[in-house]
Amino acid sequence: MALSFLSRVSSQLCRIPKTIESQSIQFNKRLYHEKVVDHYENPRNVGSLDKNDKYVGTGLVGAPACGDVMKLQIRVDETGKIVESRFKTFGCGSAIASSSYATELIKGKTLEQAGQIRNREIAEELKLPPVKLHCSMLAEDAIKAAIKDLEKKQKECK
Amino acid sequence: MITKLFCYDSVAKRYSNSLIRSFSSGILQSKQKFSTNTLSSPQQATAENWSEQDYILQADKTLEDLYDCLAEQGYEKVPNFDVELSQGVLTFKLDENRTYVLNTQRPNRQLWLSSPFSGPWRFSWNFTQREWKSTRTGIQLRTLLNEELKGLVGIHIPPEEVS
């Protein structure tokens, strides 16, 4: 209940800049798109998988100093299809939304299909502004890193 | 010792312990395993051997040169053009929906570009060629900008002046 109250308040606060702008005051609008807010408030697939599991690939990209770190994990079945994905992200709302959306995108795909996901797809879906395109690239890198980790594990097992 | 424990404890309170451990071990692993957009290639300058002061000098010089070049040509050639340089961020618009952002990224001594056509790029300074080169494809910053802008709107970005 407290959370829903807070989210209502925050959505009200987001409307305040429009009122100020209508009074002819120059205001630099930097509001998150509603899809980003949705992923921030209702992130999909948050959590961890066992990184020692031979069917789990872990991608860890970014650096705390730069402001964004993403950990994205995938679990595949025997056929190589991604059946589960989890993420944990330290960063801005756009970074969280990008990695959350990425975990949704890759589910049900083969490793090859998941490797073909491009940052543009994530950025267009979330309507990321120019300065946040880097978050979508990091999410693409995280997917690729997880796939590479899994492929290395599978090679070592053979 | 106690001070150190206190510092680590306060950090742990902000982030979960497992996340910190996985970050530090993971980042080491990622440097060894593969090269991504987030890392410089071994042939280029690294954050360790280039002082922040020198990096800022070079980055600011590049941003100012680009600002001058864009301001000179942009307003004549592009109807709704606007360019701004402030606090290490160069922003220029071809129109309402096509905005470029080029900003400094101090922690890893890079320039980060966001292009409305080709997306995000990261550039590291190459000491041999005296240019900013993409960590992904190796293309030079000015070459990329020139390719995109000259074809579209006729703005010419000359190569970096070697000083």
Image (spheres, grey):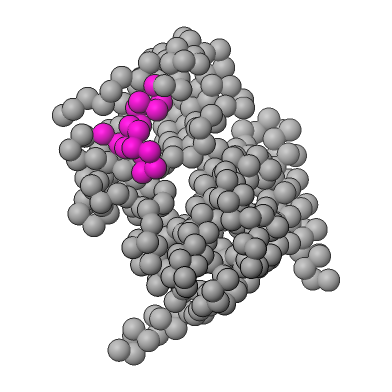
Nearer to me, A17 or A91: A91
Residue A126 appears in the figure: yes
Q: Quadrant of residue A57?
A: bottom right
Which residue occupies 34% across, 90% down? B2
Q: Residue A71, percent across and down?
A: 53, 64
Q: Residue at x 64, y 68 (%)?
A: A78
Q: Nearer the viewer, residue B16 or A71?
A: A71
Q: Is residue B30 magenta?
A: no
Residue at 34% in and 27% down: B142
Query: Which part of the image, by quadrant, shows the N terminus of chain A?
Result: bottom right
Q: Nearer the viewer, residue B34 or A45?
A: B34
The one of A149 and A120 positioned closer to us in this rendering: A149
Residue at horizontal 22 percent and vertical 25 percent from the top: B161
Examine the rendering and report whether any part of residue A31 can be seen.
Answer: no
**Outermost residue, right side:** A1
Q: Is residue A120 above or below residue A144?
A: above
Q: Position of residue A70 (x, y in %)?
A: 52, 61
Relative image position of residue B11 (x, y in whole percent): 45, 76
Give the left or right position of residue B126, taking residue B2 as reference.
left
- Segment tinted magenta in the rendering: B131-146
Looking at the picture, how far across and down is residue B39, in whole percent?
Answer: 36, 52
Q: To which quarter of the image does residue B126 belong?
A: top left
